[in-house]
Image: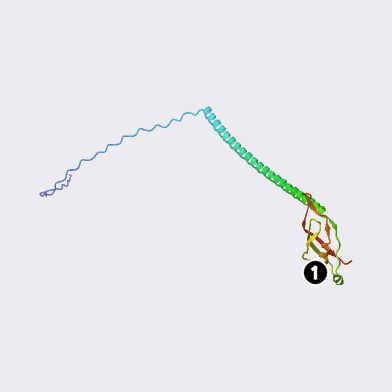
Amino acid sequence: MRTQLVILAPTPEAPAPLAPVPEPLPAVVQPSPEPLPATPAPIKPAVDPQVQAQKLQQAALARKRVEEKKRDLQAEQQRERLEAQNRAREAEQQRLAQQQLQQAEQVRLSAERARQQAAQAAADSRQYLPLSKEAPDYPQRALDKNLEGDCTVEYTVNPQGKVEHPKVLDGCHPLFMRPSLAAADTFRYQPRMIDGRAVSVPAVRNTFHYRIK
């Protein structure tokens, strides 16, 4: 015996009026992109061992040439530095030699001037060589006081060889002035001759030494 359960549907009521349904917009269909063609893998050319060896050899030669040029440049710079140092040393030696020559020339000129002055002084002294000189009298007051000293008198020797305008220079003791002037006034000289003519000789000096013996 079989039993079947049957459910009856309810009685349908009158349906409510439905609102108008808008029509759906047509869908935009995007075209599917076409697949890109696959890029073939690059084919590596076969390397020729001889070509590779030649390239390596050329690169080594290029590096060698660069190094040689660098060494040559350094050697040239070193040579230029040495030449500059040698030129500077030679210039300094020449300057020192020139300076030594100038100093030697100055010494020679000074010696020559001194010789000429000495010769001129000797000639002048011969030209107005004293012919007679008398020693002054020692002042009695200086003897009593045991005074000693020096007295220098300056005068002009005229063309006749006589003393003119005698005067006592500083440093003379007053007791020695009068006898020194009196003694100088008696001096006689051989006149100085220039171009065969006798001339005056100014600023002739004579020092009297007063000593008690």
Foreground of the two, 150 or 47:
150
Which residue is depicted at the point 58% across and 35% down?
A: 69
Return the x and y of residue 164 as percentages of the image width and height.
78, 61
Q: Is residue 192 left or right of residue 32?
A: right
Which residue is depicted at the point 83% across and 65% down?
A: 182
Quadrant of the image for the N terminus? Answer: top left
Return the x and y of residue 27 as percentages of the image width and height.
22, 40
Q: How is the image coloured?
A: rainbow
Foreground of the two, 24 or 57:
57
**Residue situated furthest right in the rendering:** 213
Return the x and y of residue 138 as percentages of the image width and height.
86, 67
**Residue situated furthest left in the rendering:** 14
Foreground of the two, 169 or 85:
169
Helix, strand or loop under label 1: helix
Q: Is residue 69 visible?
A: yes
Which residue is depicted at the point 80% across and 63% down?
A: 152
* Residue 182 sits above or below residue 32 on the image: below
Q: Amino acid at mark 1?
A: Pro
